[in-house]
Image (tube, rainbow, N blue to C red):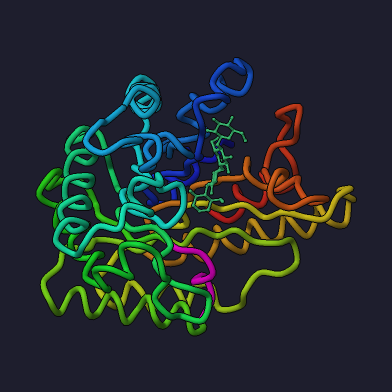
Amino acid sequence: AKSNTVAKAAGKLYFGSATDNPELTDTAYVSILSDSGFFGQITPGNSMKWDATEPSRGTFTFTNGDTIANLAKKNGQLLRGHNCVWYNQLPSWVSSGNFDNATLSSILQTHCSTVVGHYKGQIYSWDVVNEPFNDDGTLRSFVFSNTIGESYIDIALNAARAADPNAKLYINDYNIEGPGAKSTSMQNLVKSLKARGTPLDGIGLQGHFIVGELPSNLQENLEAFTALGVEVAYTELDIRMTLPSTAALLAQQEKDYQTVVTACNNVEKCVGVTIWYSWVPSTFSGQGAACPWDQNLVEKPAYSGIIAGFQ
Ligand code: G3I
């Protein structure tokens, strides 16, 4: 069975993967990535971020993002935009520009409008705002929140809605997959945005996990969001382990992938699951094997866990 085929048979919109431009020279990888039986959705890992799309003020570059968008189109896959505003991969002209509130608001408005507008009609969903919270649930401090306050989020969402009215607009974060302070803050933000009429369609739960250490109550946590009138998705799922991988770790990883996919499968308004693993080895020394395929592109037990989760 193929992962996107079973996801769709279960009533989900997609099973997807992040990808990145440098990886597209690997033809064996690209043939799996492009198989819409395996993947019905792709997300660019870096090429639509601020540093890639507006490296200097008012100068927009879409070449690499367009490559991913065209690949999705060619493969008949949905495309997730990632992202309009994030504290990371923000060029220094923005982060160190010492702009006042009005100027920074206009910079943000222009950036989101231009990037979302460029891909108008090609995108299923946009991670408009990425990682707005600290792990304790307080608003993350960076140039936009520091200068504009929480309403930088409203500016970005309003600009995105105007630029592509058919794209689903998401806020995306990690460590909100189980109940806790950060998940509660995100739910409170959803309520506040809805109360003030700011457009928002979904919450992305990234899902960067460690084998054997999943949060409990994944499904209840998803339902706490969908009860507020938004859809949800696991947007960046990977489940890493301390290397070397052993049969026991691979078996636990299979179980963990199945648990996460089952949680999405059980929640009607959880629209899909996207995997995102390539950052793991370079970020966590001694850890890896987070992907459901091995280095030779052979399906691991984790892949069976995904299939079972959709059944
Ligand atoms: O573009 C430069 C290149 O010019 C330079 O030669 C090279 C040398 O290291 O670095 C390149 O930049 C790298 C960039 O990816 C593009 O490849 C950065 O060093 C590297 O830090 C960056 O990592 C990305 C990371 O976000 C940055 O925070 C990962 O690829 C990307 O997968 C990861 O994705 C994030 C999501 O956007 C948000 N959620 C968490 C997730 C994992 O960290």
Q: For the point 89% across and 51% down, which residue is it? A: 247
Q: For the point 12% across and 47% down, which residue is it? A: 165
Prevailing secondary structure of the magenta residues: loop
Q: For the point 33% across and 58% down, which residue is it? A: 129
Q: Quadrant of residue 292?
A: top right
Residue 124 visible in the picture: yes
Q: Nearer the viewer, residue 50 or 57?
A: 57
Q: Is residue 245 above or below residue 204?
A: above
Q: For the point 57% across and 62% down, which residue is it? A: 260
Q: Nearer the viewer, residue 146 or 43?
A: 146
Q: Quadrant of the N terminus?
A: top right
- Quadrant containing ligand 1: top right
Q: Position of residue 195 (x, y in %)?
A: 15, 79
- Indicate left or right for 259 with 271 as reference: right
Q: Is residue 97 above or below residue 5?
A: below
Residue 311 visible in the picture: no
Q: Is residue 196 above or below residue 238?
A: below
As for residue 292 lying within the magenta part, the answer is no
Q: Quadrant of residue 210?
A: bottom right
